[in-house]
Amino acid sequence: MEVIKVAIISFFKKLIVKNKFLFLAMLITSFFASLDGIISPYIIGKITNTLSQKHFSDIPGILLLYLLMMLFLNVSFYLWQFCWGKITKSSNELLRSTAFNNFIASPNEKRITNTLNFINVNVKQIENQCIDSTIMLVYCIEQTIVSLIYILSINGIAAMVFLVCGLIPAVIPRLTRNWVQTGTKKWNGSYENYNLKTSDAVHGFDTIRHTNGDKKFKQFVQKALMIEEKKYFLMNFRRNTSNFLAQVSYSLSMVISLAVGTFFVINGQILVGGLISLFLASDRLTSPIISIVNIANQLTSVSPLLKNEALQKPIKKNFNNLKFTRLSNQKKIIFDHCDLGYSNKAILKDINLAISKGEKVLITGRSGVGKSTLFKTLLNEIPLLGGKILVDNSLIQSDFYTNFGIVGQDTYIFAESLRFNLTLGKDISTKQLIDILNTVRLSYLANEKSLDTLIGEKGLSLSGGEKRKIEIARALLEKKSILLVDEGLSGLDEENNEQIFELLQDLPQTIIEIEHAISPEEKKKFDQVVNLTA
Ligand SMILES: Nc1ncnc2c1ncn2[C@@H]1O[C@H](COP(=O)(O)OP(=O)(O)OP(=O)(O)O)[C@@H](O)[C@H]1O
């Protein structure tokens, strides 16, 4: 329970700090809106008494008062909804931007699905189960207080009887809570299982098609679906049963309180109008109390969403493997007795390497020897286990990542224009872009019209070679002085392979390149070939 409270409170704290006045306005407008609970009972009671006393001339005044009160209520509701909308907007912005910023601060493959799921699904759930519920909770509490004060002002003892009777239905959800929650948990489990099975089958459609597996997969998915729907039905059945029991106790309590009220009228302790007011107002007391209990229950289910990994600040791993220093003899990067590997276990030991400015270095070695591990160490993604990597001061850029341009097999193309895919939103002149497109042998795209053409998911799809040239262009536009090429030539046809090979060789930048399939002639063109062995 404590953990639940902490997650919700810390979320609201953040939201309130950002929107103090909005929350204050919401509190005030919902208070005025909560007068709804007593206005009609008050007016109906007053009219009943006026009619029974035959003071007919007072009726127009009462009706006018009723009209004004109702208009006041309408305006209060309108303003309350306005504040509610603004709070929802702010909450969604906070949740979505926090999740996205956290991801960008520490991106990795594993967190992609969770982040997207959080942004697309969980934020809506938090809106319904947390924001809407809490705003309703505040409203119900205000309505309870207003109605309680009103019925106490009519007759203290009768008010207490009505209150006690009104509380009985509120107890039922507490008694059935565990039973209902177990139903929800069971459904959640089966829903996840069904989702996983469906997602697997949908993503693996090619394998299923090629292995004639459609019948079997239909059965797997159908079975998971039937279990999920059965649990879903049972969850709703438990919820409905709990509601039914609450409704029955509510009906009983209404009858009891009316009977007690009638007794007070017979005894002359209250007027008929007072009884009607009391009866109507007590309903406006009981309903919000039941809602308060239900909402409090519901809020407990929202805390796992607020503790989602997407909202947690990522722990920044700062390895600082690179030592920036003044290097003599034209050397720009030196690997000095380096041990590289994972979890303190070196897979490459005692690596020594000295690379000069502008050198083209080929890294080779059998699959799994540790070529990518070397890049990961340079990029500070994993710690250097031993030795030193010295980098010349002249290469320092604003942070470690900006020291290296990376050209890999999986160039990501954004569903935007070619211009955006090159600039990535930065301010770079058209002339520079045209020059760079010519440099990377994409001359046929080096014009304004092509620059503004949509590419990626929304437009033109590019070939593997074109994508790789765009990645090289990005690195060149960023003025990276060292390029790390991770199998930049693989998967390309002969023509593109040759073109990109030549392009990289002709660049003035220092290039460290990992390649598998490289011809002996191409090999000779490198300044250094480093054959890694474990
Ligand atoms: N995150 C990790 N944790 C532990 N071990 C890892 C991790 N990533 C890779 N390895 C292991 O380190 C070894 C070297 O992997 P690496 O990817 O550097 O090889 P590679 O030479 O680039 O291989 P390939 O040519 O097939 O891409 C492999 O045995 C791999 O299983």
Image (cartoon, grey):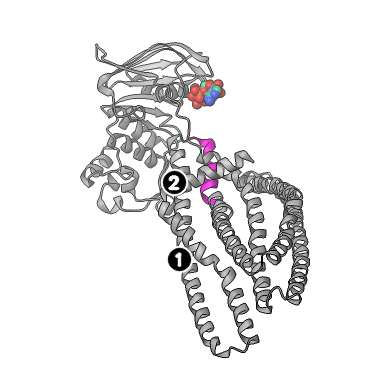
Inspect the magenta stretch and tell me whether residue 400 lies in it: no
The residue at which mark 2 appears reads as 97
Which is nearer the N-term, disc 1 or disc 2?
1
Image side of residue 207 versus residue 424, left or right: right
User: Split into 4 quadrants, where in the image is the N terminus?
Assistant: top right
The residue at which mark 1 appears reads as 79
User: What kind of residue is marked 2?
Assistant: Ser
Inspect the magenta stretch and tell me whether residue 117 lies in it: yes
> Residue, x 69% and y 48% (percent of image)?
188
Image side of residue 302 versus residue 527, left or right: right
Q: Is residue 367 visible?
A: no
Q: Is residue 255 visible?
A: yes
In front: 420, or 269?
269
Q: Position of residue 70 (x, y in %)?
A: 51, 76
In front: 25, or 266?
266
Q: Nearer the viewer, mark 1 or mark 2?
A: 1
Separation of disc 1 and disc 2 at Cα? 27 Å
Q: Quadrant of residue 273?
A: bottom right
Which residue is most to the front?
268
The magenta region covers 108-121
Secondary structure at numbered mark 1: helix
Q: 10 Å neighbourhood of mark 1: few (<14), some, or many (≥20)?
A: some
In front: 450, or 347?
347
Q: Position of residue 96 (x, y in %)?
A: 47, 48
User: What kind of residue is marked 1?
Assistant: Leu
Specify whether tag 2 is near ligand 1 (CB below 8 Å): no
The answer to whether residue 253 is above or below residue 199 is below
Q: Position of residue 422 (x, y in %)?
A: 32, 43
